[in-house]
Image (cartoon, rainbow, N blue to C red):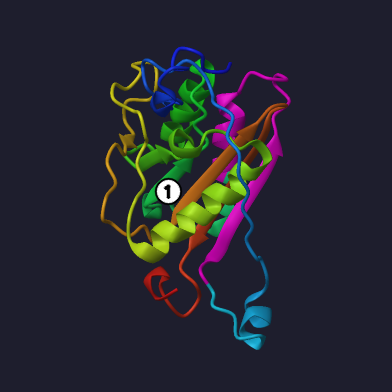
Amino acid sequence: ATSHKYNDRPELSPRPFDKARDGLVIGEGGGALVLESLASAKARGAHVLAEVLGYASNCDGAHLTAPDKRGMQRVMELALADAGVDPADVDYVCAHGTGTDIGDVAESQATFEVFQRAVPFASLKGYVGHTLGACGAIEAAWCLAMMRDGFMAANRNLTELDPACAQGLDYVTEVREQRPRIVMTNNFAFGGINTSILLGPAPGGDASQA
């Protein structure tokens, strides 16, 4: 499950969704976000970066280590329903994308089943590796930066898409100067634990003012 072909060229791995990927790379890092009610944030004069529009978490129980695309698909559908957001209104999907053979295929296929269109889609693990329990917070913070600064991060090291991955998604391969208004960020863990969060502009403003 872990990469070994690129030990002498570590900058080339991991390679989420790439035909030549050979597994995940463990990363190191941490992230933290302050989650509070709008009333609380206003009362203390906080600078509100975004709103959590909705979220979902499930455990498909299909396998201890192998991903199940039905569980992935279902958690995204539940998050969209919780947020009251139409799939057509999501501007960017931050993928879990670890660079494993079966994980990337299952996730890409599940995502296409939900969106049925070329939604911009990228994993950030090509930059920092898999930071394990920290990856959800780090990637959510990264999404907030995209919404604030007006860009879409790309899949690093994606040079040739694996034909087994869903072909109908818009795999972002270069950073785009485009501000996503609504972002979905996903994480899928061992044991069939799946999570999906939708982030949108702060109430009464837009992300560029954050």
**Any magenta on residue 58?**
yes
Q: Nearer the viewer, residue 121 or 59?
A: 121
Residue at (45%, 53%) from the top-left corner?
Answer: 183
Residue at (43%, 78%) from the top-left corner?
Answer: 205
Q: Is residue 171 above or below residue 9?
A: below
Q: Residue furthest top?
A: 5
Give the class, few, some or many, for how many residues have Cα within 10 Å of label 1's Cα (few <14, many ≥20): some
Q: Secondary structure at mark 1?
A: helix
In the rendered image, which quarter is residue 20 located in?
Answer: top left
Q: Residue furthest front?
A: 8
Q: Nearer the viewer, residue 163 or 3?
A: 3
**Residue picked out by circle 1:** 87
Q: Is residue 25 above or below residue 186?
A: above
Q: Position of residue 177 (x, y in %)?
A: 26, 55
**Given the image, on which type of amino acid does mark 1 rest?**
Pro
Q: Which residues are magenta?
A: 49-77
Q: Position of residue 209 (x, y in %)?
A: 40, 76
Q: Is residue 95 above or below residue 197?
A: above
- Whether residue 80 is visible, yes or no, is no
Q: Is residue 159 left or right of 95 when viewed as pictured?
A: left
Q: Position of residue 161 (x, y in %)?
A: 32, 22
Q: Is residue 189 left or right of 19 when viewed as pictured?
A: right
Q: Position of residue 146 (x, y in %)?
A: 40, 57
**Any magenta on residue 161?**
no
Looking at the figure, which quarter contains the C terminus?
bottom left
- Whether residue 159 is visible, yes or no, is yes
Residue at (47%, 17%) from the top-left corner?
Answer: 7
Looking at the figure, which quarter contains the N terminus?
top right
Q: Is residue 199 above or below residue 165?
A: below
